[in-house]
Image (tube, rainbow, N blue to C red):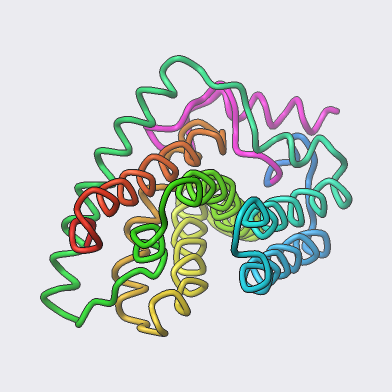
Amino acid sequence: MPQNVANLREVSNRDGLFFFERSDCDLPFYRGVPIFLGTGRWLIVLASVALAFTALIQAQQMFNTGVATFIPSLLFVLIPLVTLGLVGGWQAPSALFRPLRRRDFLLIIGFLVLNWIVTIIVGLLIVGMFQGLANPAVERVAGASGADRAIYFGATAIQLLGEEILTILPFLAFLTLLNGALARKTALALAALGAAVIFALVHLPTYQWNVPQALVGLVPIRLVLLLPFIITRNIWVSTGVHILNDWAIFTMTMIGGPDAAG
């Protein structure tokens, strides 16, 4: 309890915080709020993230029609959250989810627009440097129809929550590891970069193992999508941006075909 009080007192001081971070709450775990996760427990959590991603890929091959499409996405979300709860108590996964505030909705819209701008810039860069590859998910929704599209949108929303978990848990693990050795801002920046690189690398199969496209194309976008969580400490906000962004791409694909979103 005294350690938690000290941590809460520390975050009330803006020293060590970026100007855009909220000072009425802190990021979880790395300073012992609501619980401190040591290296051993973080390794278990990160192993569960890897297992969840593997389960997603394998299950998508078995459950790819109708409402069964939800099964891979649910596994992707539940495996790491349940593991986090088992190693840290059920207050641990709940620390990622906070009630939405009114200004959070403005943040979602603002970061959605920012992400579009960054996506356009990155897209132009990729076209100039590499031979870009189409995202199979975009092509899949373009070929779907009727109820299949509605199911796909719903399953995708859950999967995108899983992608936020896949990014945020490594980010918090890196932050915990680096915070004791580096200044908080430096540790946070390096943790965010490390998590973004992991996000890009796990998408290599999606982009046919095109490493330059994955890194150049996804790392900047992933950093933009991670910022809402860093600001609000709320995974619902970053997930909201991610869902609206991908749904917008899918909608443009449905209206204008695959070339409309590329």
Residue 198, above or below 16: below
Q: Quadrant of the C terminus?
A: bottom left
Residue 201: x %, y % from top left: 48, 74
Q: Is residue 151 visible?
A: yes
Please tell me which residue is depicted at 64% across the width and 33% down the height of the picture. Answer: 97
Q: In the displayed structure, would residue 137 be above or below residue 81?
A: below
Q: Position of residue 37 (x, y in %)?
A: 78, 51
Quadrant position of residue 58:
bottom right
Observer-nearest of 169 and 9: 169
Q: Position of residue 27 (x, y in %)?
A: 60, 38
Judge whether 180 appears above or below 194 on screen: above
Q: Is residue 179 visible?
A: no
User: Residue at left 25%, top 41%?
Assistant: 114
| The magenta segment | 1-29
Task: Return the residue found at the far front.
Answer: 146
Residue at horizontal 14%, vertical 73%?
Answer: 127
Q: Is residue 62 above or below residue 29?
A: below
Q: Is residue 136 left or right of residue 123?
A: right
Question: Does the magenta-highlighted stretch encompass residue 8?
Answer: yes
